[in-house]
Structure formats: C-alpha cells, structure tokens
Image: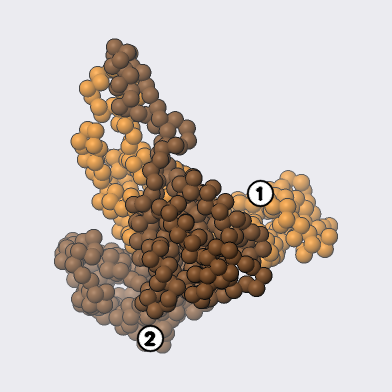
Amino acid sequence: MFETFFYNLREHKIKVSLTEWLLLMSALDKKLITDFESFYYVSRSMLVKHEDLFDKYDQAFVETFTNLKAISIEELREFFEKFPLQEVEKLLNIKKGHYDYSLEDLIKKFKEQMEKEDGKPHSGGNKHIGTGGSSPWGKNGYADMGISFGEHHNMGTAVQIANMRKYKNYSSDETMDVRQLQIAIARLKKLLPEGPEDELDIDATIDRSSKNGGDIEIVFRKRKRNRVKLLLLMDAGGSMDPYNRLVNLLFSALKSRIRHLKHYYFHNCIYQDVFEDIGNRISFPTAELIKKYSDENYNLIILGDAAMAPSELLNEGGSIEYWYYNRKPCLDWLEEMKTLFPSSVWINPEQPRLWSRMYTSNIISSVFPMFHLSVEGVEDAMKYLVRKQVVNYG
Amino acid sequence: MEFFSGTKDYITTSGLTESVNAAIVLGRPLLIKGEPGTGKTMLAYKIAEALNKKLMIWNIKSTARAQDGLYVYDTVQRLNDARFGDRDIGDIKQYIKLGPLGEALDSKEQVVLLIDEIDKAEPEFPNDLLHELDQMNFYITETREWINAKERPIVIITSNNEKELAEAFLRRCVFHYIEFPDRETMKEIIDVHFPDLDKKILSFALNRFYNIRDLQSLRKKPSTGELLDWIQVLIYQKIDPELLGKDIPFLGTLLKKTTDIEVVKRRLMNV
C-alpha cells in the first residue's frame, strides 16, 4: 500500500530520492508521526521540496489513501522494513557513486538507528514501531493492536486536506528550467578586479613592508568580479516561433546572470541592419554594432535555427523582404563577425540531427561552432566561449 | 527531546509544527518559504524562545560567501600586532573570528541558527554549505583544526523565492511553505496582538483587508505586518467603523505603491 504511494508520487513526477525516502523512514521510526494528518504533513515536508509540487503530492495522496479500509501498524512497519531499500534502488536505478552515501552505508545507518530506538521505553521492548501500549502513534489512546487508520477520523482529515487541492495555483509544468540554464551559464565567467579596494593584498603588503624596513604598510586591492560581456543576436523570424518558449528561457537565464548583456534581433539572416525591437522597426547598423562591441571584447551568441533559402544566405539582394535590399550577402557579414569576435558561437534550437540535412545550417556551422539549445548544448557553448575569451585587464 | 508547539504570541498554521519538529529530531535544516510577512524569520526567533536556546543569525546578502559564515582570518590585525601590539602573534587562533555558522557549530550548547534569505546569494552559495550542514563540521586551514559540532544546531533557512535552489541542497532539507493566514488564523493572530480589540473594528479591518487582497490587479498585496500596523492606527485614531461607509482610512499604512492605492480607491471606495 505504501508502495502504491511511492509509485503514485513518481507517477505525478515527484522525484523522491533515496535520501528523502530514508529520511521519512527515520521520521516514522522516531515517532514524529502521531496520526494520519501528521503523516500527510511530515511526509510532504520530507518528500516535496517546492510548493509548485504540493498539488501533485495532494493528487498522489488522494489516489493512494481514499477508500482505504485500514492500515495496521504491522503493515506500516513491514513495509518500511522490506519495501523501500531494494525497491527504491530498483526504481531509482541507482548507480554506484551516484549518491553521497553508498546504499549499504545508508542501510547500515538506518539499521543502527532502529536498534538504538528499540532499546527505548517508548517502543516498549517490542521491535515494532509504536506498538506496545501507550503508542505514540495515537494521541487518542490507541493500543496494542496498532492503529487502524481507516477507521480513524484523522485519516479522513488528511485526505480531506489533500482533496482540497489548495496548491493548484502553484503548479507548473516546466521541463527545462531556468535554474539549470543559469548553472550552465555560470560557466561563462571573466573575473576581473572591480569595485572598491577592500580586499587585502597580502603579497603587496609584505613587499611594501619589507621595503619599509619592517614598518607595516597595508595594501588593499579590488575584488575580482565577473565582468563578462555578452552580445546576443536573436532570430525573430517566423520559423523560430515553435521555439519561443525555449528562447525566452535562455534569454531570461542570461539576463539574470550577465550584467553586461546587449541584445538585438534579426529576421532570418543578418544583413546591414539589426533591430533593437522584436518587430524589426528600430534598426541599428550592423557595421557599427560589430565595431562597437568587438572593440570592447564582447562575447557573441547568435541564436537562430539557421534555416533559410540558400539565396538568403549567399546572394546580394537575397533578403526575402521585398522592401529590403542587401548589397552584401549574409554570409559575408557572418564571416566578418567570426573574425572580429573570436569568442562567438551559434546556438540552434533545431534538433542537431537535422543540421546536416539543411544546406544553410551546414554552411553556417562551418563559420560558427554550432550548439544545441539544451542544457548540455548551452553548457558546451559556454565552455567554448570561455576558452576563446580575450583576456584583457583594462 | 523537546518539541516545538508555537508560542503564545506566534500562531502556527497546519503542518508547521510537524515540519519544525521533524527537522529538529532528524537534525536536518528546515527550509521555510512563503509570502513576505508570513513570519518566516520570526519562526526562528520563536523556536529559540520556546525551546530556550540561543539564536544566531546569519543575514545573507548578494555578496555573501559560504566561507564568511564559517570564519574570517583577520590578517590585518595580525600584521598590525606584529608591528605595534604586544600580543603573541605566533598564536594564530586569536585572529580567527568565527562567523555565525562557525559559532553555531562551535557552541557547547545546542543553538538555533537562522540563515535568513538564502536566495539573495549567488546560485552556488547553498551548494557550498552542503558539507557543513550535512557533517556539521569544518576545517580551519590557518590553524589546521577541525571544528566539530558538539550539539547539532537547529538550522532554519528562509527563502523568498528570488532564485531557485539546487536539488542537492533541497534533498537535505525539510521543507515547509507557510501559507498566507486565512481569516480564522488571522483573527487569532490579531487577538494575540490586540486582545481587547473592539469587535466592530476587528470585523471591519478583516473584511476590508481580505477584500483588498482579493483584488487581482495589485502590485504588492498587504501582509500581516501591515494589517497589524493599520489596526494600531485605527485604534489610536479612535475610528468608529459604523461612521465610515465605504471609506478606508489610512490606506497608506496598508499599501505602499501609489498605483495600488488608486486601484483600491477606484474598485472598493468608488472614488
């Protein structure tokens, strides 16, 4: 029956880890759970770590415990003795070294704890949790037989609470989250001294003091801070629409991590103008953009699907906009950018297996190293940028 | 083992006491989230008070580093002493200043440690604390010394949700989300602060307060603290709710944004 609870939680995408499951076990063992209502709260506080997931927990809870006749304390104990470790191990498909403790250690630890607990008067010498008379399991005075939760009014209360589904509004269904991307982006660092001189420079202090003949002279320096600069060019063309959510996710992750972030838009391909707004109304000359930001050692990320008609990429006048004439082909612009921005990458939301099938993305990926818009892809892109970054202590 | 069950002036909501006691008994940090003004920080004070333990506070700022919480090595003082002082500068120990976490671990008695607003720091910050919070010990490089907690401190961590916290960190915590108090709980809270409050003022204040909170277009909803301030003003000014009609006096006590005040005036006061 508790297996069902565990399965139901996983069904509802609550990823219970072994550490957490064991924590719940020791909570049971240490008599923290006094009735079914407290089981609802304690198990939630151990297994669910975000209010977004409370609603899913409630659903799993209701599915497991509604229409339940009775759970005896024996069953509970049996379950927590037999089920979790082997089953959880199987379920989580645990590889060695994947967790901070080995599974054996955890089992040992838990067993030790159990044995210690058993000696205490509260468990009444019986090895079953909370049996043996004045059971801590029932504040209403349940005795030897163990608690039949099903007939206990508190059982109803807990399910009622879960059934209220009051956390429905917190729920969200994001798959790739901003945090994962933020961590990936955190790799893009350029630590340079900045701000007030408030860090003691020990080497310089010793140096000066020796020169002073032992008279101490304290030298301070600026702390190193992340001063990475990034220019982001985003394709706002129609073929990018399906990826809007992903693009926004990356954009907000970048924005939250990088203080010196400039962004511009282009439509399908870059010609002599880029745009400050997504509707391509306020233009900015590309030549000036390249000059300005490459002089200041910006990193460059171009975000687009690299999918276009070959003529758009290769021809003079290849722009598909009837009102727009380009004298210089897009590819020339891209090559110029690659030369002036040594640390530059192309991030493509399209599946990597499709890149080689597309004529234009093939060409573009020979100019810019191309990475997939996924957590791993972004991480690799950041590693590449850091390697290529110009170090200039200005 | 002592159990926490709230104090006479701190009303706990459902599930909170269970989470607090679980964290204490299992020796795990308790992560507390919730809307501003739901008493996240206050909880740590009240646990310390109820269990009669010393409280240590570590206020996290955006520049906070995990190391600062453990200890700081005061080189400047040592250099200064080398030149002018009469202290024995060979004794490095005296230049090691423990931070809040360091002190909590070093304390002979069990203390309550509040790590306030952990989400203000850089995203890596919580991960840097994993070892210390798990093992409850740390190493001082300068003196080659391990500090081992004699009594596992009760660790309360608050977060305002400004940043998401890492999975590895979350796995080790007991988590509780303090919901905004409903009308009944709020009544109890008000009763604790103003035991002799006039019934008319109470129901007037509560009605208006929840009406305002129900407005979807507010930028910042008023919280418990603001409600209590407002009631204080109402009492002080001897306001008689029956003479008010639709008016909501001293609205500025409840709402801090001019746009919000205008929304309330338009929607609730028909101004």
The quadrant of the rendering that contains the C terminus of chain A is top left
Image coordinates for residue B50, horizontal then vertical, percent: 43, 49
Q: Is residue A151 left or right of residue A292?
A: left
Asked which quadrant contains residue A363, the reply is: bottom left
In this view, which residue lies farthest toward the top? A213
Residue A68 image label: 2
Name the foreground residue: A367 vs A23.
A367
Name the foreground residue: A331 vs B83.
A331
Residue in the picture at 34% in, 84% down: A70
Q: CA distance from mark 2 to mark 1?
A: 48 Å
Answer few, some or many: residues within 10 Å of disc 2's Cα (few below 14, many 20 plus, some between 14 and 19).
Answer: some
- In the rendered picture, chain B carries what hue? orange
Chain for numbered disc 2: A
Helix, strand or loop at label 2? It is loop
Residue in the picture at 33% in, 25% down: A204
Q: Is residue B5 above or below residue A158?
A: above
Name the foreground residue: A264 vs A364.
A364
Whether residue A100 can be seen here: yes
Residue B229 image label: 1
